[in-house]
Image (tube, rainbow, N blue to C red):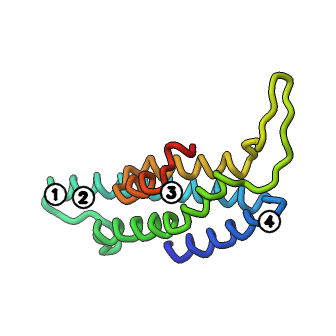
Amino acid sequence: AADTAKRFLALMLDDLNTDSKSIVFTEGTNLLISVIDSLVRKEDTNRSLREEAARLECSILPNDQTADDVEMQINQTFKALLERTPELVEFLKDPGPLEELKLTWTSLSPPLGMARLKTVELLLVLLKTKKRYVEELVIKLDLINIC
């Protein structure tokens, strides 16, 4: 899963560097958000299974897969995503040339835009994982002041 996430992020971020900031980035971000949500649910399920197995003094994980194996897969995938997070943060800081959006009462320059909105959503989902290394990266990148 980690290798897939790395390749997928490379495609998305290459798209982000184009002038169009096309649907590849936006839809790719939607997919990553779904994957992260799924991994978090899987982790929660495995934690519950582990607790129940300890209570019953048996093993109930399928296919001889240990809870530690599942945890390792999840952590590797999250870390693969986090390796590219600084690039996402840079995109939030400097989205490149965007046309000013004039509204009735004000103007936005640069406007948020769909790609930046999806970037914020992805970072939010990563934060919801409550992983220590995610929180450490948020502090290191000063993400709170950016978002």
Q: Is residue 56 left or right of residue 66?
A: left
| Label 1, residues with CA under 10 Å away: few <14, some 14-19, many ≥20 | few
Q: Earlier in the sequence, mark 1 or mark 3?
A: 3
> Which residue, given by chain and number where applicable, does mark 4 sit on?
18
Label 2 residue SS: helix
Give the image location of residue 75, x and y in percent. 39, 66
Q: Are marks 1 and 2 in contact (CB under 8 Å)?
A: yes
Q: CA distance from mark 3 to mark 4?
A: 26 Å
Residue 76 falls in image quadrant: bottom left
Of circles 3 and 4, the one toward us is: 4
Q: Amino acid at mark 4?
A: Thr
Q: Earlier in the sequence, mark 4 or mark 1?
A: 4
Q: Amino acid at mark 3?
A: Ile
> Which residue, given by chain and number where applicable, does mark 1 sit on?
54
Of circles 3 and 2, the one toward us is: 3
Give the image location of residue 130, x and y in percent. 37, 50
Q: Earlier in the sequence, mark 3 or mark 4?
A: 4
Q: CA distance from mark 1 to mark 2?
A: 6 Å
Q: Amino acid at mark 1?
A: Ala
Q: Are marks 4 and 2 in contact (CB under 8 Å)?
A: no
Q: Are marks 1 and 3 in contact (CB under 8 Å)?
A: no
Q: Is residue 41 visible?
A: no
Q: CA distance from mark 4 to mark 2?
A: 46 Å
Q: Is residue 34 left or right of residue 136?
A: right
| Label 3, residues with CA under 10 Å away: few <14, some 14-19, many ≥20 | many
Residue in view at x 56 percent, y 46 percent: 146
Q: Earlier in the sequence, mark 4 or mark 2?
A: 4
> Which residue, given by chain and number where applicable, does mark 2 sit on?
50
